[in-house]
Amino acid sequence: MKAVVIHAAKDLRVEEREAETPGPGQVDVAIEAGGICGSDLHYYNHGGFGTVRVREPMILGHEVAGTIKALGQGVSHLAVGDRVAVSPSRPCNECEYCLLGEQNHCLNMRFYGSAMPMPHIQGAFRQRLVAEAWQCHKVADGVSINEAAMAEPFAVTLHGVNRAGALLGKRVLVTGCGPIGALAIIAARAHGAREVVATDVMETVLKKALEIGADRVINVAETPEQLSAYSSNKGYFDVQFEASGNGQAVRSGLEVLKPRSVLVQLGLGGDVSIPQNMVVAKEIEMKGTFRFHKEFGLAVDLINQRRVDLKPLLTGTYPIEDAVAAFESAGDRAKSMKVQLAF
Ligand SMILES: [Zn+2]
Ligand SMILES: [Zn+2]
């Protein structure tokens, strides 16, 4: 089978790998769609992020869906031919965090396509993937495999919503409208947000943000005063989902957030300076959010039941042979939202 392997920055190869056979409790999935994520792009463009570096060849990818081709022993709730979205979250279920129900903080997490541990955790951009049956969530008839493969980034934003707390009736600001910001808009809408205002610096993504459910969009490169107008009377928004990783987005968010509001940081930016006095004086809660676990099943359910429509986020699909072109296209924010590979 073919797999998409990162060797170093800008050194991405399509290579042959030995297919595996499913053991007890496992299934063999023919992968059909795989979304390229910001983390995959970091490995491709920079060879890693933060202190994490690719130190050995690693199959990329963790946003995948496909069709079951074989069942291991004892698998009863799935059948050959079922289409499934595969959760890349593989906690140990034994460490102290797993036992607390905080599997996203598992000490022995084997999340697909991660160079954090050594040996690296191989990813899911491959033609055949042997997965645990419990990772696989059935995709309803009529739902495209491409949309199913977006369950993973959607689950990231659903976890962000869980971190924010109840959104019913809340005014929400989303800063940064790439795939995660866009999905945060959809997630906030699905959870009863009263109003969603979204910001970015690029017209194309702002147009998309309007199309998928933002009430208003602001180009903060061209008209930042439209955002700062919300700062009167100590602010306007109850919740901010910060998906840009940009320090300025945090600072201007703090200005327009109301007292006792919540800022959920989804984007990874590095070292950012923030006006501490504003956090203190407005009693703002700043919350991080990292991956997901149980939200993956919810993401698939919402997609299956047509409670959300993620299709507008799909920019294009490339055959696995054109993986390099796909990664180049995915990295071009002006043209691409979510780019997927076909296997
Ligand atoms: Zn992802
Ligand atoms: Zn664990």
Image (tube, rainbow, N blue to C red):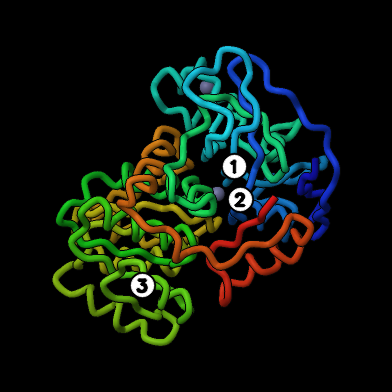
Q: Which residue is mark 3?
A: 211
Horizontal and vertical percent for residue 309?
37, 58
Residue at left offset 74%, top offset 66%? 325
User: In front: 270, or 132?
Assistant: 132
Q: Amino acid at mark 2?
A: Ala
Q: Which residue is mark 2?
A: 33
Q: Which residue is mark 1?
A: 66
Question: Can you say which quadrant of the picture contains the N terminus?
Answer: top right
Q: What residue occupies the far right of the structure in this picture?
A: 16
Q: Amino acid at mark 1?
A: Gly
Element assignment for label 1? strand
Spatial CA distance of label 1 from label 3 is: 28 Å
Horizontal and vertical percent for residue 230?
22, 74
Whether disc 1's CB lies below 8 Å from ligand 1 is answered: no
Sequence order check, earlier mark of 1 and 3? 1
Q: Residues within 10 Å of mark 2 (few under 14, many from 20)?
A: many
Element assignment for label 3? helix
Q: Are marks 2 and 1 in contact (CB under 8 Å)?
A: yes
